[in-house]
Image (cartoon, rainbow, N blue to C red):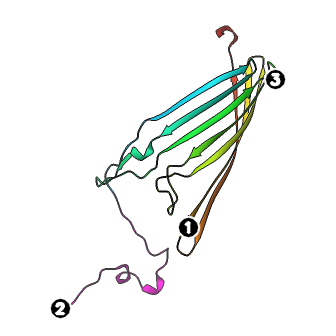
Amino acid sequence: MQTQIDSIFTKVDASKVDSFTVSYTSSAKGEDKIEMPWRTSLGVAVSLRDNLTVGVEYEVRSFASATYTDANGVQSAPWTSSGVLRCGAEYKPSDWLILRGGVRQEAEVFQPVTAALRGEPIKYPVYSLGAGVKYFGATLNIAYEYSDMHYVDSWSNAISENRQINNSIMASVSYELPWLK
């Protein structure tokens, strides 16, 4: 009795196998489905003075109850839930200048592979500063954000330090039509 082995090497000389001569093609057919839960937030803003406002907001992200169903019908809940807190202040030293600052806690939908507390997502702070300038009905807003996501995965013989630092600058221009006030 003779056994036949079907492999790429029966078609190509083994000494010439590299990324240029070996190709692999596959196809998949089906439909993935994701059911996402509601996100809820509650916030309050208080004017301490005519020119000073502070605000606090708490958001509940219940992503652990999200369900993912792949094309084969296999269902999973791959994410973690979190609650995030935001606070900020806006100060208007004059009619044409607005200064803003704030900090928020950001949370990812995943946890480190070797997390000591299972189900706890990665959380990190995001700091922001901004200013708005008003001139003849037009407003220019500029903001800067800084975040530093940092977490550690510990293995039996190694430690993986993961870090992502983001610096973002955003700008917007708006114009208020005077007859619509």
**Residue 154, numbered label:** 1
Tags 2 and 3 in contact by the CB under 8 Å rule?
no
According to the picture, the residue beneath numbered tag 2 turns out to be 1
Q: Nearer the viewer, residue 181 or 82?
A: 82
Q: Nearer the viewer, residue 130 or 13?
A: 130
Which quadrant, please, contains the C terminus? top right
Q: CA distance from mark 2 to mark 3?
A: 92 Å
Q: Secondary structure at mark 3?
A: loop
Q: Nearer the viewer, mark 3 or mark 1?
A: 1
**Residue 93, numbered label:** 3
Give the side of residue 177 with respect to residue 59, left or right: right
> How many other residues sit within 10 Å of disc 2, few (<14), some (14-19) or many (≥20)?
few
Q: Which residue extends farthest right? A: 94
Residue at horizontal 34 percent and vertical 80 percent from the top: 7
User: In this picture, which residue range is highlighted in magenta?
Assistant: 2-26
Q: Which residue extends farthest top? A: 179
Q: How many marks?
A: 3
Which quadrant, please, contains the N terminus? bottom left
Give the side of residue 154 with respect to residue 164, left or right: left
**Residue 83, numbered label:** none
Give the side of residue 122 with respect to residue 175, left or right: left
